[in-house]
C-alpha cells in the first residue's frame, strides 16, 4: 500500500496527468484496459526520473490490484471518455471493493448533469467527485486549469493534490509561469484550481469555458477569413499581423497558436498547410451543450451559438461547393494598400470588442445558470483560474477578474467601467470592420452576433413591443403596458379594438 493515487485511463490526457502528479512527488498506481499503455507510462517514468531513484509510477493489471496498491482511504482519478466509460469504471471499482469513504475523481469532459446523477448514484459506495480539466495534452503534463466540484470533504483531501498539479500564474501580471521541463514543475504563483461548488458546477463551468473557446476560435477564424478572402493576404502575412496583435491586448494562447498554424508549411507540398486543410470543422459536443443550456435557461449567448452553427455550416461542404457556383455575392473589391492597412487596424479592434461580448455572454450564462441551480459561483476566481493552463488563457482574463473583484454582483461584463470604456473607444472600428466584411461578401456570423448582442443589450426599448402585439393578435397571449403597474396583463380584442382592453389576472 505504497501509492498515494490510483489513476485509470492512460490516454494522452491521463498519461500526462499521471506524469504531472509524479513530478509533484505523488506515487501513482496506474491501470488501463490496454496493457500497452500501462507499459508505456512505466517506460516514460523510467526515462524521466532521476537516475538511481525509485519508480514513481506502478503498473497494475486489474482494478483490484490498483486498489490494493493504494493507501487508505483510496483516491482514484479517472481520465476516460465521457459517458458510459465513466460508469463502466465506477462499477468495476465497486466490484473490486472500493469503500464508502474512498474518492473517485472524474476528469473527463463529462456532461455536468451526469456528474450530478453519479454523485447520487454512487453515494454509500464511494464519493464521486468531478474535476473538469482544460489545457490539452501540454496543460495536463505541465499544469492544466482545474475546475473541481462536489463533496466539500473530498475537496479538503484533493486540494493539495490539485493545486500542486495546476498551472500557476504570476498574480501581478496575470501571466502564466511556465516550465515545460519534466521533473522541474513550477511551484510558485497562484494555482489555477479553485473549488467551484456542488457536484456538476465544475463541469458546467468547464462546459461554458468550451463555449467561450468555440466563440474565441471562430472570431479569430472570421478575422483571418476577411484578411485572406477580402484583403487577399497570404497566410504568412496574416500570421505576422496576428503575432503583432498577440503582443497587445489580444495576447492569448489561441492567438499565438493561430499564428503558428498560419505559418506552417505542408511538409509534403511546401504550400501553407492551412490551404490544404479541409474547411470542415469537427466538434465533440461541449460547445453544443453550452448553446443548449443557454437556450434552456434563457441566457442570450448568440456569439457562442453562432460559433457552433458556423461549425455545422462548415460541415455542409458539398452543398456549399454547389451553392458557390450558383449564388452570387458582391463584385470583388480592390483595396489600395492604405485602405487595406486601415481595415487590418479596424479588424484588431473588432476582434477585441467581439471577444469581450463572447466572454460577457459566457459569464452571464454562468450567472443565470448558477441562480437556477442554487450555486454560488465566484466569477473573479473563475476568471483567475482561466488565466493559465486552459485553452482560452489570456491576459484579458486578468481584467475580467478585476471587474468581478470590484463588483461581485456585476450584472454583465459590458457594464464594468473598464470594458464599457474599451468598447466605447473601439466600437466605430468594430462596426466598420463588419461593414467592410459585409460589402465584400465575407461571412462573419460570430462577429456580427457579438455586435448585435452589444447593441441589443444597450437598447432600452427593443421591438419586443411589436412582437407582443403580434402574439396577442394571433393567440391572445397578452401583453403588459408601460403606463400601467408591472406584471398586469392585457388583451385587446383585435377584431373590435374599440372594446376596452381586458386586464387579465397574473
Ligand atoms: C480544453 C479543450 C478540450 C478539448 C475540446 C475540444 O479545454 O482543454 O476544450 O476539452 O480540446 O473538447 O472540443 P471540440 O472537439 O468540440 O472542438
Image (cartoon, rainbow, N blue to C red):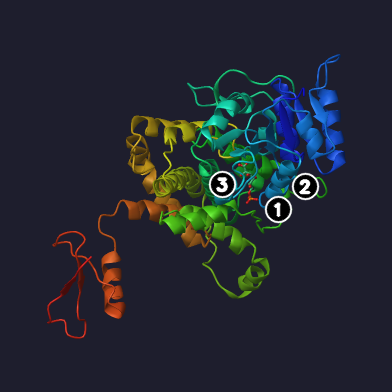
Q: Where is the N terminus found, in terms of image quarters?
A: top right
What separation in Å lies between label 3 and label 2 (alpha carbons)? Answer: 50 Å
Crowding near the residue tagged with mark 1, few <14, some 14–19, many ≥20 C-alpha atoms within 10 Å: few
Quadrant of residue 45 within the rendered picture:
top right
Residue 291 horizontal/vertical position (percent): 51, 56
Whether the residue under disc 3 has CB within 8 Å of ligand 1: no
Residue 192 visible in the displayed image: no
Q: Are marks 2 and 1 in contact (CB under 8 Å)?
A: yes
Q: Which mark is residue 275?
A: 1
First in residue order: circle 2 vs circle 1: 2
Q: Secondary structure at mark 2?
A: loop
Q: Which residue lies at the image location 49% right of the left edge and 43% below the top edge?
A: 348
Q: Which mark is residue 120?
A: 3
First in residue order: circle 3 vs circle 2: 3
| Number of marks in the rendered image | 3
Q: Nearer the viewer, residue 424 or 129?
A: 129
What separation in Å lies between label 2 and label 1 (alpha carbons)? Answer: 9 Å
Quadrant of residue 346 within the rendered picture:
top left
Q: Is residue 94 left or right of residue 114?
A: right
Residue 336 visible in the displayed image: yes
Residue found farthest to the top: 52
Q: Are marks 1 and 3 in contact (CB under 8 Å)?
A: no
Q: Secondary structure at mark 1?
A: helix
First in residue order: circle 1 vs circle 3: 3
Q: Is residue 323 above or below residue 335?
A: below
Residue position marked by numbered label 2 in the rendering: 266
What separation in Å lies between label 1 and label 3 (alpha carbons)? Answer: 49 Å
Amino acid at each position: 500500500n505504497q501509492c498515494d493515487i490510483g489513476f485509470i485511463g492512460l490516454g494522452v490526457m491521463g498519461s500526462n496527468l499521471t506524469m504531472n502528479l509524479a513530478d509533484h512527488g505523488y506515487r501513482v498506481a496506474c491501470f488501463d484496459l490496454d496493457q500497452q499503455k500501462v507499459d508505456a507510462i512505466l517506460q516514460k517514468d523510467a526515462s524521466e526520473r532521476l537516475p538511481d531513484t525509485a519508480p514513481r509510477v506502478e503498473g497494475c493489471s486489474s482494478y483490484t490490484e490498483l486498489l490494493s496498491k493504494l493507501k487508505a482511504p483510496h483516491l482514484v482519478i479517472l481520465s476516460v471518455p465521457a459517458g458510459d466509460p465513466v460508469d463502466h469504471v465506477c462499477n468495476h471499482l465497486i466490484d473490486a471493493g472500493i469503500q464508502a469513504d474512498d474518492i473517485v475523481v472524474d476528469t473527463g469532459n463529462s456532461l455536468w448533469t451526469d456528474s450530478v446523477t453519479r454523485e447520487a448514484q454512487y453515494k454509500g459506495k464511494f464519493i464521486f467527485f468531478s474535476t473538469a480539466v482544460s489545457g490539452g495534452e501540454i496543460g495536463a503534463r505541465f499544469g492544466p486549469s482545474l475546475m473541481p466540484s462536489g463533496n466539500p470533504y473530498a475537496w479538503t483531501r484533493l486540494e493539495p493534490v490539485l493545486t500542486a498539479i495546476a498551472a500557476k500564474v504570476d498574480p501581478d501580471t496575470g501571466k502564466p509561469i511556465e516550465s515545460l521541463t519534466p521533473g522541474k514543475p513550477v511551484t510558485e504563483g497562484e494555482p489555477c484550481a479553485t473549488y467551484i461548488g456542488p457536484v456538476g458546477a465544475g463541469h458546467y463551468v468547464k462546459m461554458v469555458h468550451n463555449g467561450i473557446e468555440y466563440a474565441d476560435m471562430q472570431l479569430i477564424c472570421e478575422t483571418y477569413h476577411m484578411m485572406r478572402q477580402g484583403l487577399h493576404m497570404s497566410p504568412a502575412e496574416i500570421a505576422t499581423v496576428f503575432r503583432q496583435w498577440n503582443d497587445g491586448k489580444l495576447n492569448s494562447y489561441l492567438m499565438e497558436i493561430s499564428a503558428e498554424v498560419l505559418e506552417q508549411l505542408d511538409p509534403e507540398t511546401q504550400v501553407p498547410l492551412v490551404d490544404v486543410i479541409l474547411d470542415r470543422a469537427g466538434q465533440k459536443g461541449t460547445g453544443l451543450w453550452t448553446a443548449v443550456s443557454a437556450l434552456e435557461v434563457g441566457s442570450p449567448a448568440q456569439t457562442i451559438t453562432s460559433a457552433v452553427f458556423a461549425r455545422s455550416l462548415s460541415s455542409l461542404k458539398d452543398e456549399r461547393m454547389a451553392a458557390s457556383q450558383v449564388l452570387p455575392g458582391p463584385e470583388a473589391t480592390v483595396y489600395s494598400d492604405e485602405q487595406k492597412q486601415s481595415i487590418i487596424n479596424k479588424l484588431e479592434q473588432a476582434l477585441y470588442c467581439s471577444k469581450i461580448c463572447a466572454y460577457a455572454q459566457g459569464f452571464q450564462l454562468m450567472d443565470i445558470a448558477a441562480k437556477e441551480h442554487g450555486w454560488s459561483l465566484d466569477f473573479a476566481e473563475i476568471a483567475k483560474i482561466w488565466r493559465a493552463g486552459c485553452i482560452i488563457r489570456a491576459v484579458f482574463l486578468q481584467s475580467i477578474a478585476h471587474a468581478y473583484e470590484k463588483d461581485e454582483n456585476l450584472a454583465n461584463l459590458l457594464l464594468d467601467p473598464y470594458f464599457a470604456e474599451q468598447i466605447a473607444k473601439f466600437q466605430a472600428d468594430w462596426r466598420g470592420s463588419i461593414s467592410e466584411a459585409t460589402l465584400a461578401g465575407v461571412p462573419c456570423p460570430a462577429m456580427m452576433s457579438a455586435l448585435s448582442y452589444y447593441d441589443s443589450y444597450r437598447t432600452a426599448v427593443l421591438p419586443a413591443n411589436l412582437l407582443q402585439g403580434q402574439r396577442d393578435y394571433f393567440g391572445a397571449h397578452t401583453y403588459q403596458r408601460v403606463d400601467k403597474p408591472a406584471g398586469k396583463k392585457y388583451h385587446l380584442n383585435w377584431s373590435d379594438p374599440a372594446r376596452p382592453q381586458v386586464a387579465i389576472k397574473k
